[in-house]
Image: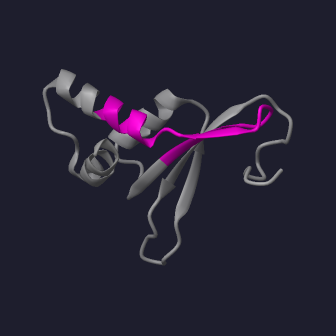
Amino acid sequence: MRGFPPSVPYGADQTIYLVVEGPGQHGIARKTERDDIETVITDLLSGQFNDPIEVVAFNTLEHWTDDLSKDIAREIRCRCDIEGHDVPVYLDEFVGKTSA
């Protein structure tokens, strides 16, 4: 059960998306779970994360993990382009870093 948050039962066939934020004013990185990728993107665009560093997906039954940061950044940039506005300032670093 290494690497999986304790709130996800071992063996349940779930894919969980984990948003990792940089250390805040207390020096502790925050990790927030979401159940689907659309919620991750919506929450990022609405400013619910202070300093997103990466987005990781993992499956509890198949025991795989995948860093989705570049894919999420590309989708955020695409949605902003379609809507005709810039990437929100609070996502500039995340999108810029992962798009490079």
Residue at 61% across / 33% down in the picture?
35
Q: Position of residue 93 (x, y in %)?
A: 28, 54
Residue at 70% across / 37% down in the picture?
64
Q: Position of residue 26 (x, y in %)?
A: 48, 78
Relative to 15, 75 lies left or right? left
**Which colouring convention does the figure follow?**
one colour
Does the magenta segment cover residue 67? Answer: yes
Relative to 23, 91 lies left or right? left
Residue at 41% across / 48% down in the picture?
48
Q: Position of residue 10 (x, y in %)?
A: 85, 42
Provide the residue span drawn in magenta: 55-76
Q: Is residue 27 above or below residue 58?
A: below
Front one among 21 and 1: 1
Residue at the top extreme, as displayed: 82
Relative to 5, 97 lies left or right? left
Residue at the front extreme, as displayed: 100
Q: Is residue 31 above or below residue 85?
A: below
